[in-house]
Image: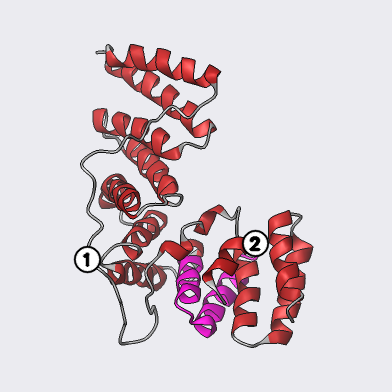
Amino acid sequence: MKKSQIIILVIGIISIGFLYSLPTIVVENSEENIPMEEGGATPQSMDAHEPYLSEEDREQVNSLRGDLDNEENGERFIALADSIGNVYRASAKMDSAAYYYGLIADRMPETFHMEKAGNAYYEAYGFAMSDEKTAYLASKTREYLGKVLEKDPSRLDLKTKIAMTHVSSTNPMQGITMLREVLDQDPKNELALFNMGVLSMQSGQYKVAVQRFEDLVANHPENIEGQFYLGVSYFESNQKNKAEKQLRVVKDMTTDPQIIAGVDNYLGRL
């Protein structure tokens, strides 16, 4: 299956919008083949708060930013920065929202603020289009979520997110190793199973992907993306009867027109 075909089929599935920007890697074999080029330097700066907003929101942000620049009171500073971040979040400008949440975490490095900033950077990372921006957002994700994980190593959800930022770096096996560690601790971990399945698909190991997605949907049947990718993995591993059955299950589970379009595409090819 061509990468472009999956990209078309999964438009709108936010969880893995960056799937096919990942390097080609083998995630299960004992001898990993990792064709990578050196690079991915972090930019010295990023204009993460371009005002691509409605006129009303832009006026609100400019007013809040003017107050923020002159604010010395810590609590007031946090309230202003959070308000700006929330405006950007509401407009789906996550890199801009993350920037302001990061200002708060830097000013008051409490767990809640660091996690909020790190999660926002991770969400923005999922939409990054350039290698430079991807590397930058990944590093900021690791910076903030890593601090939370240091304080609470039981946060496997955060460890999984950090792992995925490594997968798209020059050292992808660090990310794979972290995902395996998560599954060693929690074999039913939803996010780790999903991402390991996705990575197996990306590297063309559809039989391995089937195993991951079967485990995922057995433990998390409500995960519609996992259900869909199980059907795709059956199809691509030439298990056509299972693919048809699974894809029809997916079609009955959702009214999302994009997922249904993807299901119909595969059913039409059976």
Q: Residue at x 32, y 18 (%)?
A: 77
Q: Position of residue 14 (x, y in %)?
A: 55, 53
Q: Which residues are magenta?
A: 192-221
User: Which quadrant holds residue 266?
Assistant: bottom right
Task: Please state the horizontal and vertical placement of residue 139, each as a whole percent of the image.
Answer: 28, 50
- Mark 1 or mark 2: whose residue is earlier in sequence: 1
Q: Quadrant of the N terminus?
A: bottom right
Identify the residue at image location x=65%, y=61%: 222
| Viewer-closest of 53 and 187 | 53
Residue underneath mark 1? 38
Label 1, residues with CA under 10 Å away: few <14, some 14-19, many ≥20: few
In-front residue for pair 13/185: 13
Q: Is residue 228 above or below residue 32?
A: above
Q: Main secondary structure of the magenta part?
A: helix
Residue 223 appears in the picture as rendered: no
What residue do we see at 74% from left, 82% from top?
270
The numbered dot on residue 250 is none
Front in this rendered view, residue 105 or 155: 105
